Image: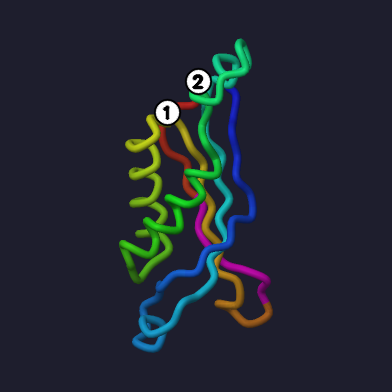
Amino acid sequence: MDKVFIRGLNIQTTIGFFAWEKEIKQTLVIDLAMGWNTQLAAENDELDKTLDYADISEKIALFANDNPVDLLETLAERLANYLMTTFHIPWLKLSIGKPGAVHNADTVGVEIERGQAK
């Protein structure tokens, strides 16, 4: 299976369980791999047959800010569903990290895989 990926996408959003977290923006770091047949775009060098990673990156930030949640797990599930539905992605692997959330760790987070890899 071909994959289109975005690595190290930094977004600012409101996320967290504690009251003080609901008052601030925090950095999340997102890695995303999406199953996609890149051969269709490559055949005739056609942009409209690709996954537009710039558009997807913007939509991720908008989605996170328009849909605040407490848990990374909730954001990951909802974001995966949104991306798969909106962009007709058959498979994805999504990692969301929250740097600085735990002292002495570079980052903590969740990683999920959804859909069917072909």
Colour style of the rendered protein structure:
rainbow
Q: Secondary structure at mark 2?
A: loop
Q: Is residue 57 magenta?
A: no
Q: Position of residue 76 (x, y in %)?
A: 41, 54
Residue at image point 38% right, 85% down? 23
Q: Secondary structure at mark 1?
A: loop
Relative to residue 92, is residue 12 depicted above or below? Answer: below
Residue at image point 56% right, 19% down? 46
Q: Amino acid at mark 1?
A: Pro
Q: What residue is pinned by disc 2?
A: 118
Q: Is residue 107 magenta?
A: yes
Q: What segment is highlighted magenta in the picture?
A: 105-111
Relative to residue 63, is residue 5 depicted above or below? Answer: above
Residue at image point 60% right, 24% down? 2
Q: Which mark is residue 90?
A: 1
Q: Amino acid at mark 2?
A: Lys
The answer to the question of whether label 1 and label 2 lie on touching residues, with beta carbons closer than 8 A, is: yes
Q: Position of residue 47 (x, y in %)?
A: 55, 25
Q: Nearer the viewer, residue 21 or 109?
A: 21
Q: Main secondary structure of the magenta part?
A: strand
**Marked residue nearer the N-terminal end (1 or 2):** 1
Alpha carbons under labels 1 and 2: distance apart: 8 Å
Please tell me in which quadrant of the rendered image residue 102 appears: bottom right
Residue lying at the far top in this picture: please name it: 43
